[in-house]
Image (tube, rainbow, N blue to C red):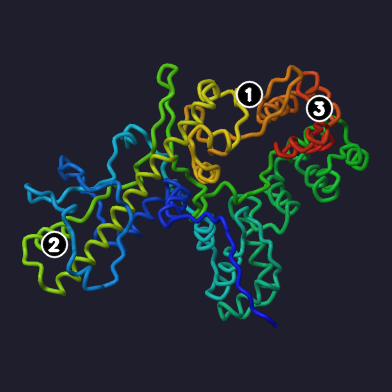
Amino acid sequence: MSLSQSLQQKLLQKLSPQQIQLMKLLQIPTAHIEERIKEEMEENPALEQVDEHFDDTINDEFDNNNNEEEIFDGSEEQYENIDISEYVHEGDDEIADYKTKDNNYTDEDEHKVIPIKNEVSFYDVLIEQLRMLDLDEHSYKIAEQIVGSLDDDGYIRREISSIVDDLAFRQNVTANEEEVENLMTQIQQFDPPGICARNLQECLLLQLERRKEEGSKIALAIKVIKQYFEEFTKKHFEKIQYGLNLTDEKMREINNIIIKLNPKPGGNIGELNKAESYIVPDFFIVNNNGILELVLNSKNTPDLRISEGFRDMLKDYDKGNKQDKKQKEAIMFIKQKIDSAKWFIDMIQQRQATLYNTMHAIMKHQEKFLLSGDETDLKPMILKDIAEITKQDISTVSRVASSKFVQTEFGTFRLKYFFSESLSTDSGEEVSTKEVKKILSNIINEENKQKPHSDEVLTELLNKKGYNIARRTVAKYREQLNFPIARLRKEL
């Protein structure tokens, strides 16, 4: 075996630490950026939040062009050549302030961020009702375990044997399946009706059982769910009518009773620790007499500056004899921390600028929709379009759009909502696929529910309107819009 050496030329693209940090900061939504900033402040004592009473008339005289963090290796040459002139304001004995404040990205108090919901959790509501039962300690622990096993929709999806095992291994409580079932029956009487059901059929029956006194229609509805549940879910109404000898009118009345029941009884109670229960917009778009104005939400981005204590230490060193080695080591540490703080502040500023510029480009591109609120006014737009306008990389635009929200007069939207592929019309015009979906949605909503349109008919109707679209594409769009097939859309 012989060894050989060869020269190879490769073209590699590497991201600097600053670029990597910026990419990470761009992905963080406004709701969480404050947490990230606090982490950095905990790690770097040279970085601090500006006091709202602080007089910010001091000029920014740090060198913004030199953001590279200096690396100190402890050599004698570095000890002898510590230069802090750029950190000290000569002639004024005051170290210049370095802050994130930028009036281009205002934090107007007029804009109200949607608040966190102050609500009781689903678990707490049920535990409160559980306390009203006359249970001994043993039974209470079993019931508490059952309540804790319910999912967010209010169903008990676990096997009873698994709950018994959990009680034994986690709670050190010995129970049998009969005890668990008896307590489940009691919990099923809690509000909201339908809670603690094993499946949808049982959930609907629990709700109907509470309304037995309302008369014969409820009794018939119970029969339908007990005996013809599968036929009802598949809308085979003819089989139900034949089996129970029901007229069209009676079947229609029973159907109206059942469809008004709640299939997710736990879904309308407050959720515990769910970020989805509120949204903090990253941007606000205001329609000022036909002119769109963009505001970046800076409420969760505190104003940062270099620590006054660190600046004072540099001033003291600058006035001293600068001969003590330990003092020089301390000053090099201070310089490193200040450089790191400057670098982080620059990254926050770049993040704000990138967010603003990207959203501004999206706003201008979708100006017609943002003025009208009509989904058919959305233009086709892909990441590449915005990247070309802003002179940014596609990956940068993607990071901005991935987890951000914008509040408009027509509601709060994910930025991803504004992006869609294009589709050609008969006239050769490029339209957004969202426009086609909107037209499709309107057609389905306006159809005769006793004779809903098949996918073939929907395709023909769209083609007549000038949209060149295939049946399989119509079926895909229909599914994305959460419309079932024609038979399941049928109503009596």
Q: Position of residue 198 (x, y in %)?
A: 71, 59
Other residues around mark 3 within 10 Å, as few (<14) / some (14–19) / many (≥20) = some
Whether tag 3 and tag 2 are in contact, CB under 8 A, the answer is no
Sequence order check, earlier mark of 3 and 2: 2
Q: Position of residue 480 (x, y in %)?
A: 71, 39
Give the label on residue 376, or none.
1
Q: Which residue is mark 2?
A: 313
Q: Where on the picture, by quarter, is residue 373?
A: top right
Residue type marked 1: Thr
Above or below: residue 382 compared with residue 302: above
| Quadrant (top left, top right, bottom left, bottom right) of the N terminus | bottom right
As helix, strand or loop, the secondary structure at mark 3 comes to: helix
Residue located at (14% from left, 60% from top)? 314
**Would you say 191 lies left or right of 105 here?**
right
Residue type marked 2: Met
**Would you say 400 lies left or right of 339 here?**
right
Q: Is residue 403 visible?
A: no
Other residues around mark 2 within 10 Å, as few (<14) / some (14–19) / many (≥20) = few
As helix, strand or loop, the secondary structure at mark 2 comes to: helix
Sequence order check, earlier mark of 1 and 2: 2
Measured Cα–Cα span from mark 3 to mark 1: 18 Å
Q: Where on the picture, by quarter, is residue 286?
A: top left
As helix, strand or loop, the secondary structure at mark 1 comes to: helix
